Amino acid sequence: MGALILHAVAALVVGTHPAVADLTPRQKAALVVVSPGTRTLPRPLGALVFVDQEGGPTRVFPDLPPAHAAAAYTTASQGYSAGRATGLALRSVGVGVDLAPVLDSPDGPLGSRQFPRASIGVAFERGVVSVGAGSCIKHFPGLGSAAISTDDRPHVDAVLRPREVAGFRAAIKAGAPCVMTNHAFYRKLGRRRASLEPATYRLLRSLGFRGLTITDSLSIVTPFPADWPVAAARAGADLLLFTRAADAERAIDLLLPFARSGGLDAHVARVLRFRARYVVG
C-alpha cells in the first residue's frame, strides 16, 4: 500500500461513545471500513486516523520522523527512539495510528522498508505505543518469501516461515495493538489470499493476539470481487482497508446484509474499543 492518509468512514456517523446495540446496520458496516483521505482536506470530527509513516520515502508526512527507512537502523535502541519520536509527531498532527512497522523478513521484496532484524522493528513498535499512539505491525504472516510485493501484482505466492512468524509473536508480546494481514497466497493456510483466509486469523490469535486486525488495501484490483468484504470479515478481519473512496462506499453497501444478521457485531465491538483508545482530540 502506498503512502496515504486514511480514516474510518464511521467517524462521520457515530457518536463519541456508541454502543454496538445502538448502531444501525449501515453504521456498523461503515465502522469497519477504512477509506482514503488527504493531508489538506478537513478530517471528519472524531476521525480515527491511520497513516503509513514507516520512514524514509514511505511517509505521509515527509517532514516528520522517522527520517530513515527501516533498513538503515542497526540497533533496537535506534528503532525504539525512532518509534517514540514518530508516535509523538503523529499525535501532534492528529494521527492516532501508524501503519508500521513492517516485520517482513529482510530478504523480502519490500527493500528498504524491511528492518535488518525483527527485533529492531519490535523496538520501533514499542516506541510508538510508549507515547500513546497506535502501531499496526505488518504484513502478517510475513512477505519475506514472496518474489514480489502484493502492491505490484494481485497474485503473489509465499511460504509460511516459522522465524518470520516469530517476529510477529514477539511484537504481540510487546503489546502491538493492531496487525495488518497481507494478500499473498500460502498453501499451508488455504486456497484464498491470506487476508481472506480464516486460517490466517486463527494462526494470529494462536500467538496470543487479542487486538484489532486490518486487511491490507482491498483496492488491489478494480473492481474488487463482490464477495471480498464479507469474506474478509467472516475470516476474522475487524477493519477492511480501501485506498479508493468509491471502493469503500461500495464495500459498505455489500456488508449491509451481513451487518443486519449480526455478523459484524464482534468486529464492531473491537473497533469501538480501539477507536476510543486512539482517536486524537
Image (spheres, helix red, strand yellow):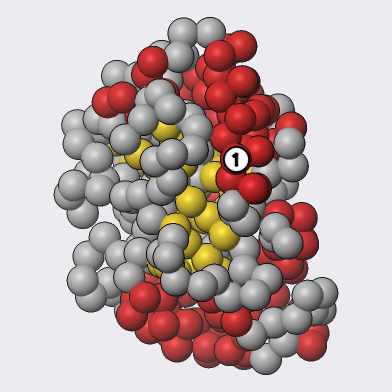
Residue at 19% from the left image edge and 31% from the top image edge: 147
Q: Position of residue 190 (x, y in %)?
A: 38, 49
Residue at 25% from the left image edge and 48% from the top image edge: 151
48 or 273: nearer the viewer? 48
The quarter of the displayed image where residue 188 is located: top left
Q: Compared to 243, does 12 lie above or below?
A: below
Left or right of 239 on screen, residue 126: right
Residue at 51% from the left image edge and 72% from the top image edge: 42
Task: Identify the element where label 1 is drawn.
Answer: helix
Q: How busy is the neighbourhood of tag 1: few (under 14 within 10 Å), some, or many (20 plus)?
A: many
Left or right of 182 on screen, residue 269: right
Q: Quadrant of the C terminus?
A: bottom right
The quarter of the displayed image where residue 30 is located: bottom right
Q: Position of residue 128 (x, y in %)?
A: 64, 34
Q: Compared to 71, does 256 lie above or below?
A: below
Q: Position of residue 48 (x, y in %)?
A: 62, 63
Q: Position of residue 85 (x, y in %)?
A: 61, 30
Q: Would residue 102 be seen by someone viewing this image from the given angle? A: no
Query: Disc 1 marks which residue?
Result: 89
Kind of residue sitting beneath label 1 = Ala
